[in-house]
Image (cartoon, helix red, strand yellow):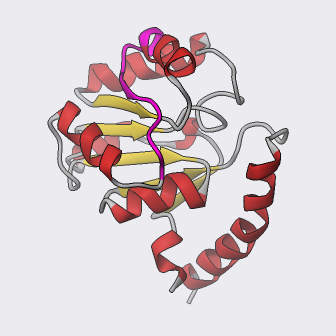
Amino acid sequence: MLEGLYPDEYLKSIDEIDFEAYYKQGIRGIISDIDNTLVPHGFPADEHIIKLFRKIHNLGIDTCLISNNKEPRVKPFADAVQSKYICNAHKPCKKNYIKAMELMKTDKHSTLFLGDQIFTDIWGANRAGIKSVMLEKIHPKEEIQIVLKRIPEKFIMWRWKKSRHV
């Protein structure tokens, strides 16, 4: 029952992802959340993230940012990292995950998703059939609706970790 909420992988940060290995596995597109996945909530793209996206693009992997935020938040970030983007995505609705793949000309087998929340990011990616990597949230300060969702997330992640050691 909870399996639909489980990520395929869980890592501390984006810096732990071996993008070269994913490329060798056939990944040609990465869909990513922004806030608390790539940078702290509301922060602009920093030099580290800009360089990382340049590295990803130089490997031959396209990117598309997908966010429930509005365009004034998402477009400047996407422009800074030279990425396609979808704002007002209504995650976990799978429609915009599919649209992101269409923009990148990838499919569910050649796409990887990165996010920090189970009930929006990971659930949506799983519903779209995309391999999902959950990253530890960057900054502890979050809006109350996210804080409340983090409570059941802890239980789900505990079950996920337990299921991987069976």
- Residue 22 in the figure: left or right of residue 26: right
Q: Quadrant of residue 129?
A: bottom left
Residue occupying image coordinates x 52% and y 70%: 5
- Depth check, front residue: 39 or 84: 84
Report the residue at 21% width, 55% height from top. Answer: 109
Q: Residue at x 21, y 31 (%)?
A: 103
- Whether residue 81 is in magenta: the answer is yes
On screen, 134 above or below 164? above
Q: Is residue 3 above or below residue 54?
A: below
Q: Which residues are magenta?
A: 79-91
Residue 14 image offset from top left, x and y in percent: 55, 38
Nearer the observer, 26 or 86: 86
The residue positioned farthest toward the bottom in the image shown:
166
**In which quadrant is the C terminus drawn?**
bottom right
- The number of discs equals 0
**Could you tell whether 98 is left or right of 15 in the image?**
left
The x, y position of residue 141, in whole percent, is 85, 38
Residue 40 vertical placement versus 28 (above, below): above
Q: Residue at x 71, y 29 (%)?
A: 40
